[in-house]
Image (tube, helix red, strand yellow):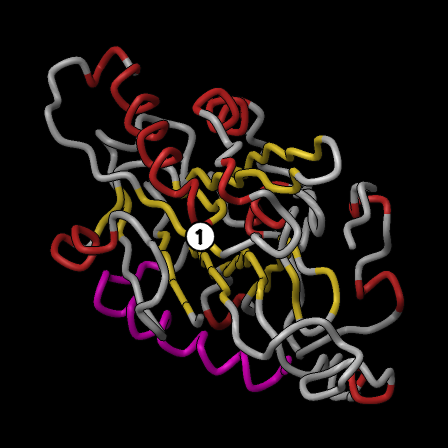
Amino acid sequence: MLKALFVIAVLFNFINPCQSQNKSRVRDLGIEPGILTPGKWNAITDVEGVSVGQKTLILGDSIRTGVTVILPHQGNIFQEKVPAAVFVGNGFGKAIGFTQIEELGNIETPIALTNTLNAFLVANALIDYTLSIPKNANIRSVNPVVGETNDGWLNDIRGRHVRTSHVLDAIKSATDKTVQEGNVGAGTGTLCLGFKGGIGTSSRVLPKDNGGYTIGVMVQTNFGGILTINGAPVGKELNNYYMAKEVPYVVDGSCMVVIATDAPLSARNLKRLAKRSFLAFGRVG
C-alpha cells in the first residue's frame, strides 16, 4: 500500500563550508520540543518508503546552493501516484506543478527543492528522470513538483549552477535513513531568523491507541523573525533579531515545507492538515 504524502508551500517574499551533520541536533542537547515521540531517525524518512537525496554545491567564493529531492516511495512514482495536497501561504514563490496537484490530488514525480532561478531547470531534470524509466516510454505529460527559496544573498543565483546531473545524483543517492541537515542541498545558501538557515527535518509517531501513524516533515528555511527555541527567546537574548541594527537581514523571506505521513488521509484532509502547518511560524519567530 502506498503511503500518503503531501506538499506544502508557505511562501513570503557568511557561509560555513562545513557540513552540519557533524553538529548536534537540538535533542542531543537535552531539548525535547512537544509531547510526541520522534521516529527512529527523527526525520521525514521515518515514514515508510520515503527517501531523501541531496546535492550540495560549494565552489569558489560565490557558489553556495544545491538541490534536495524527496521520493515518496521506491517504485515508479508516475505509475504509482501518491495522494497529495498543497497550501500556499503567499503566492510570491516560483513553485512548479502545484496546479495539477490542486486539480487531481496527487503527485507523479519526486519533489525537488532548490533556489529560485534554478527551479525551472530542476523541473526539466525531473521530467528527464521520469521519461528515462522504461515503463514510462509512452507517456506524453509529466507534472514535475518543485519548490524554491531565494539564496541570492549567499549564492551567485544568476549563475543557475544546479544542473540536470546534480538532480539525478540527488535522486540516485536518496536514502531512507538519516538525513543530512543544515548547510546541505537546497539549504546551502539560505538564512533563517538572523542565523544560517538550511534544511531541517523531524518526525513524530502517534501512540498506538491513536493509530500509531508517523508524520515526517522537511523544511527549506529562508526567513526572518526572532529565534525561539522551546519557548526561550534566544534571538532576543543574543540581540540577533528583526530590527536589531547590526543584523544583515530582513524579516520576510521564504520557507518550503514538505510533510509525509502514512495516515490514510484523502487529498482533502491532507490539505486541511497542510493549512495548519502555517501556525508553526508563530512558534519559531
Q: In terms of depth relative to the viewer, which is nearer, 138 or 245? A: 245
Q: Nearer the viewer, residue 281 or 114?
A: 114
| Left or right relative to 155: residue 102 | left
Q: Which residues are magenta?
A: 264-285
Q: Is residue 270 magenta?
A: yes
Q: Is residue 198 left or right of residue 280?
A: right
The x and y percentages for residue 212 are 51, 62
Crowding around mark 1 (Cα neighbors within 10 Å: few <14, some 14 to 19, many 20+) is many
| Quadrant where the N terminus is found in the figure | top left
Residue to which mark 1 is pinned: 148
Q: Residue at x 39, y 35 (%)?
A: 122
Q: Is residue 149 above or below residue 69?
A: below
Snapshot quadrant of residue 173: top right
Which residue is depicted at the point 85% across and 44% down? 22
Q: Amino acid at mark 1?
A: Glu
Nearest the camera: 182 or 78?
A: 182
Q: Secondary structure at mark 1?
A: strand
Percent coordinates x, y for residue 275 in the rendering: 35, 75
Where's residue 207, x and y in %?
A: 56, 69
Name the side, left or right, on which 87 lies relative to 147: left
Q: What secondary structure is the stretch in magenta mostly built from? A: helix
195, above or below 118, in the image = below
Q: How many marks?
A: 1
Which residue is painted at 28% across and 45% down in the image? 82
* Position in image of residue 123 (x %, y %): 33, 36
In the depicted view, which residue is nearer to us: 218 or 45?
218
Please identify the quadrant where the C terminus is shown: bottom right
**Image quarter for residue 153?**
bottom right
Q: Is residue 8 magenta?
A: no
